[in-house]
């Protein structure tokens, strides 16, 4: 696939390709090719990454005469359009320019997109098309926005940083998000096509502070330090790696273990890392046992997030059969191969989650119980800041701290009838849109929390409340630390 960054292009030709991509971005935005616009056009409140089974029905709903309808058909649904309709949709950029950039194929009277474009927030994300029913998924396939992509985006702290790094960048989605709050971003991948898509997406979105490097893991950035590191690695535990973007290249969960162990060496003194992982859970073993062992020698904070644990059969059913042309007999054989691999290696359960590394030595385990909310990153940052305050080790530091109630904080009361009257049994503090954590508090602590205004130090509000309840809320990120200035 010849994208605008392919080596060997002249500088003049490279500029023409960059102009073609900028023109395509302008055409997409002018037509309101956005999450809101696409959802309105396809008549669905669902995500805009459309499952193949629904493509025909969605195509019938589109206004094929409008620029937006044609662009959705071409770049989201993968429908071939007559040359005239396609040319009108992408104007003022020409089809010839887009063909030269590797974005479309012009075959006689019809035009077919070679890429898929997904809207996300204010971004346009280009990736490989899903395979047609008669095609197989390619080993070097570059995916778009999936559940794990969104999970990492939700968990990643968004504080301003100097340098940020994405390991295994794929289409560059996380790197584009990092570019909003990092002065410099480095994105690496072992797949050259992934870096091509990353550069294409930077062009589509007018982002210029990302450098793209080819190589395995931290090798392309050896000796460098970063304030924020993120990775959505190929974490699927499989009998053999078939697809670069998905399945672990090492046996079992060794790849994720190596990634977690290597990450602290690339962090600055105040650096934070957010890594998606999967790991084997041995029989009768706690879900956190393995990632705890991986991080036991790390002189830093470790926040272990557990999304789910599934049995071997469920995992094989979920991952063994790829999209595209796979017969039922081949699908059965693939599932059998995965189940036999799990049996031979005594793999009964596999857990999914994330490891977040931060500066303050502490171990925190969190059961997510489902996909985090839209304010999960802010919740993660509050946990990190809370641990930093508590690391001072003195009650005076906590009492002198200025604390605030985060947006979405709530208190739920449990009442029970005793002696013909409602009696308060417990008060539980949690925050909407975060990680789903909750902490029980007593009446005095509840009163203190209600008075936190982000201006006065805690000692002016404490009264008769014990600091133990406040400390527990700080550890859980349920109250915010206000930094001076």
Image (cartoon, rainbow, N blue to C red):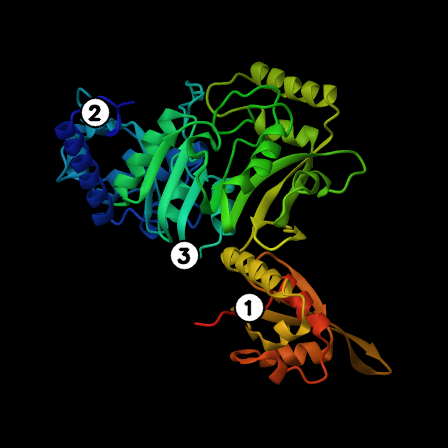
Of 302 and 63, nearer the camera is 302
Q: Is residue 177 above or below residue 352?
A: below
Within 10 Å of disc 1 (Cα), the crowding (few <14, some 14-19, many 20+) is: many
Q: Of the two numbered discs 1 and 3 on the same chain, state the one appearing first in sequence.
A: 3
Q: Secondary structure at mark 1?
A: strand
Asked if disc 2 and disc 3 are in contact, CB closer than 8 Å, the reply is no
Looking at marks 2 and 1 on the same chain, the residue that comes earlier in the sequence is marked by: 2
Report if residue 413 is visible in the image: no
Which-is-in-front pick, marks 2 and 3?
Answer: 3
Residue at which label 1 appears: 480
Q: Compared to 39, does 430 lie above or below?
A: below
Viewer-side residue, 49 vs 456: 456
Q: Is residue 213 left or right of residue 204?
A: right
Q: Residue under label 2, please give it.
A: 110
Q: Is residue 45 above or below residue 138?
A: below
Q: Earlier in the sequence, mark 2 or mark 3?
A: 2
x, y percentage for residue 153?
Answer: 47, 48
Q: Nearer the viewer, residue 110 or 114?
A: 114
**Mark 1 or 3, closer to the camera:** 3
Give the class, few, some or many, for how many residues have Cα within 10 Å of label 3's Cα (few <14, many ≥20).
Answer: some
Quarter location, residue 321: top right
Q: Residue at x 35, y 34 (%)?
A: 212
Secondary element type, mark 3: loop
Q: Position of residue 171 (x, y in %)?
A: 38, 35
- Judge whether residue 275 can be spotted in this image: yes
Report the Cα–Cα distance between label 2 and label 1.
57 Å
Q: CA distance from mark 1 to mark 3?
A: 17 Å
Q: Quadrant of the C terminus?
A: bottom left
User: Which element type, helix, strand or loop, lies under badge 2?
Assistant: strand
Q: Position of residue 329 (x, y in %)?
A: 58, 14
Q: Which mark is residue 160?
A: 3
């Amino acid at each position: 696939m010849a994208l605008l960054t392919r080596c060997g292009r002249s500088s003049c030709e490279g500029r023409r390709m960059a102009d073609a991509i900028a023109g395509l971005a302008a055409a997409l935005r002018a037509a309101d090719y956005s999450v809101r616009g696409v959802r309105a056009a396809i008549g669905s409140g669902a995500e805009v990454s459309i499952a193949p089974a629904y493509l025909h029905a969605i195509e019938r709903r589109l206004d094929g005469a409008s620029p937006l309808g044609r662009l959705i058909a071409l770049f989201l649904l993968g429908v071939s359009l007559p040359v005239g309709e396609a040319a009108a949709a992408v104007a003022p950029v020409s089809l010839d320019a887009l063909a030269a950039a590797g974005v479309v194929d012009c075959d006689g009277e019809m035009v077919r997109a070679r890429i898929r474009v997904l809207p996300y927030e204010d971004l346009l994300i280009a990736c490989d098309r899903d395979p047609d029913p008669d095609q197989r998924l390619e080993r070097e396939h570059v995916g778009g926005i999936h559940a794990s992509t969104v999970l990492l985006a939700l968990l990643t702290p968004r504080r301003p940083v100097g340098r940020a790094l994405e390991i295994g960048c794929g289409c560059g989605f996380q790197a584009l998000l990092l570019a909003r709050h990092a002065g410099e971003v480095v994105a690496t991948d072992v797949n050259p096509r992934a870096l091509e898509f990353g550069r294409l997406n930077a062009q589509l979105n007018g982002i210029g502070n990302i450098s793209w490097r080819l190589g395995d893991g931290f090798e392309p950035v050896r000796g460098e330090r970063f304030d924020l590191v993120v990775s959505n690695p190929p974490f699927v535990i499989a009998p053999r790696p078939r697809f670069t973007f998905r399945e672990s290249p090492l046996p079992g969960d060794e790849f994720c273990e190596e990634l977690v162990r290597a990450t602290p060496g690339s962090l600055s003194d105040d650096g934070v890392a957010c890594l998606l992982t999967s790991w084997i859970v041995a029989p009768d073993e706690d879900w956190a046992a393995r990632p705890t062992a991986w991080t036991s020698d790390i002189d830093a904070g470790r926040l272990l997030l557990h999304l789910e644990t599934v049995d071997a059969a469920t995992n094989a059913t979920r991952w063994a059969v790829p999209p595209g042309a796979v017969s039922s007999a081949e699908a059965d054989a693939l599932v059998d191969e995965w189940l036999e691999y799990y049996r031979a290696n005594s793999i009964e359960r596999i857990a999914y989650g994330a490891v977040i590394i931060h500066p303050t030595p502490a171990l925190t385990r969190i059961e997510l119980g489902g996909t985090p909310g839209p304010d999960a990153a802010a919740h993660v940052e509050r946990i990190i800041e809370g641990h930093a305050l508590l690391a001072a080790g003195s009650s005076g530091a906590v009492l002198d701290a200025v604390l605030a109630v985060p947006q979405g904080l709530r208190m739920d009361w449990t009442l029970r009838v005793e002696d013909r009257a409602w009696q308060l049994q417990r008060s539980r503090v949690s925050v909407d849109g975060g990680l789903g954590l909750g902490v029980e508090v007593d009446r005095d602590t509840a009163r203190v929390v209600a008075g936190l205004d982000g201006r006065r130090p805690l000692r002016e509000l404490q009264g008769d409340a014990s600091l133990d309840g406040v400390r527990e809320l700080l550890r859980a990120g349920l109250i915010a630390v206000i930094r001076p200035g």
